[in-house]
Amino acid sequence: MALTLSGTCGNWPSPCKAKLRIRYLFNQPKKAREMGITVKNFVRENFLLTRQLREHLTLMFALQYGSADRIELG
Protein backbone atom coordinates (compact mmCIF):
# COMPACT_ATOMS: atom_id res chain seq x y z
CA MET A 1 0.00 0.00 0.00
CA ALA A 2 1.36 3.40 -0.93
CA LEU A 3 0.15 6.95 -1.24
CA THR A 4 -0.58 7.84 -4.85
CA LEU A 5 0.19 11.20 -6.40
CA SER A 6 -3.49 12.11 -6.14
CA GLY A 7 -3.19 11.81 -2.36
CA THR A 8 -5.11 8.57 -2.00
CA CYS A 9 -3.92 5.13 -0.99
CA GLY A 10 -3.24 2.61 -3.71
CA ASN A 11 -0.79 -0.02 -4.90
CA TRP A 12 2.32 0.73 -6.90
CA PRO A 13 2.55 -2.05 -9.45
CA SER A 14 6.33 -2.05 -9.90
CA PRO A 15 9.59 -0.72 -8.48
CA CYS A 16 10.14 1.23 -11.71
CA LYS A 17 6.88 3.13 -11.29
CA ALA A 18 7.72 3.79 -7.65
CA LYS A 19 11.10 5.16 -8.73
CA LEU A 20 9.46 7.50 -11.24
CA ARG A 21 6.99 8.77 -8.68
CA ILE A 22 9.72 9.37 -6.12
CA ARG A 23 11.74 11.27 -8.72
CA TYR A 24 8.64 13.34 -9.49
CA LEU A 25 8.29 14.24 -5.81
CA PHE A 26 11.95 15.29 -5.58
CA ASN A 27 11.26 17.74 -8.40
CA GLN A 28 7.93 18.91 -6.94
CA PRO A 29 8.62 19.83 -3.30
CA LYS A 30 5.25 21.55 -2.86
CA LYS A 31 3.40 18.39 -3.92
CA ALA A 32 5.68 16.28 -1.69
CA ARG A 33 4.86 18.51 1.29
CA GLU A 34 1.11 18.28 0.58
CA MET A 35 1.37 14.50 0.38
CA GLY A 36 3.34 14.42 3.62
CA ILE A 37 0.63 16.36 5.42
CA THR A 38 -2.03 14.05 3.96
CA VAL A 39 -0.12 10.95 5.09
CA LYS A 40 0.49 12.35 8.56
CA ASN A 41 -3.21 13.10 9.03
CA PHE A 42 -4.19 9.70 7.63
CA VAL A 43 -1.88 7.89 10.06
CA ARG A 44 -2.99 10.06 12.97
CA GLU A 45 -6.66 9.29 12.32
CA ASN A 46 -6.34 5.61 11.43
CA PHE A 47 -3.37 4.01 13.14
CA LEU A 48 -2.33 5.80 16.32
CA LEU A 49 -2.95 4.00 19.59
CA THR A 50 -4.00 7.21 21.35
CA ARG A 51 -6.94 7.70 18.97
CA GLN A 52 -8.03 4.08 19.38
CA LEU A 53 -7.69 4.34 23.15
CA ARG A 54 -9.76 7.54 23.19
CA GLU A 55 -12.53 5.86 21.18
CA HIS A 56 -12.58 2.77 23.42
CA LEU A 57 -12.59 4.83 26.63
CA THR A 58 -15.38 7.03 25.28
CA LEU A 59 -17.42 3.93 24.46
CA MET A 60 -16.84 2.44 27.93
CA PHE A 61 -17.85 5.70 29.67
CA ALA A 62 -20.94 6.02 27.48
CA LEU A 63 -22.00 2.46 28.26
CA GLN A 64 -21.37 2.86 31.99
CA TYR A 65 -22.85 6.34 32.52
CA GLY A 66 -25.36 6.51 29.70
CA SER A 67 -25.07 8.40 26.49
CA ALA A 68 -24.42 12.05 27.15
CA ASP A 69 -23.48 14.86 24.85
CA ARG A 70 -20.28 15.43 26.78
CA ILE A 71 -18.12 13.43 29.14
CA GLU A 72 -16.44 15.43 31.91
CA LEU A 73 -13.54 13.90 33.79
CA GLY A 74 -12.25 15.01 37.16
Image (spheres, grey):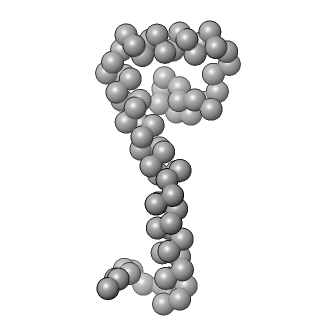
Residue at left offset 42%, top offset 40%? 40
Residue 17 image-quadrant placement: top right
The outermost residue toward the right is: 13
Q: If the image is split into quadrants, where does the N terminus sit?
A: top right
4 vs 14, nearest the viewer: 14
Residue 52 in percent (x, y) is at 52, 62
| Number of disc labels | 0
Q: Residue 6, relative to residue 25: is it above or below?
A: below
Would residue 46 be found to the left or right of residue 10 on screen?
left
Residue at left offset 44%, top offset 11%? 24
Q: Residue 16, relative to residue 34: is it above or below?
A: above
Q: If the image is split into quadrants, where does the C terminus sit?
A: bottom left
The outermost residue toward the bottom is: 65
Residue 5 in percent (x, y) is at 48, 23
Residue 37 image-quadrant placement: top left
Residue 73 in percent (x, y) is at 35, 83
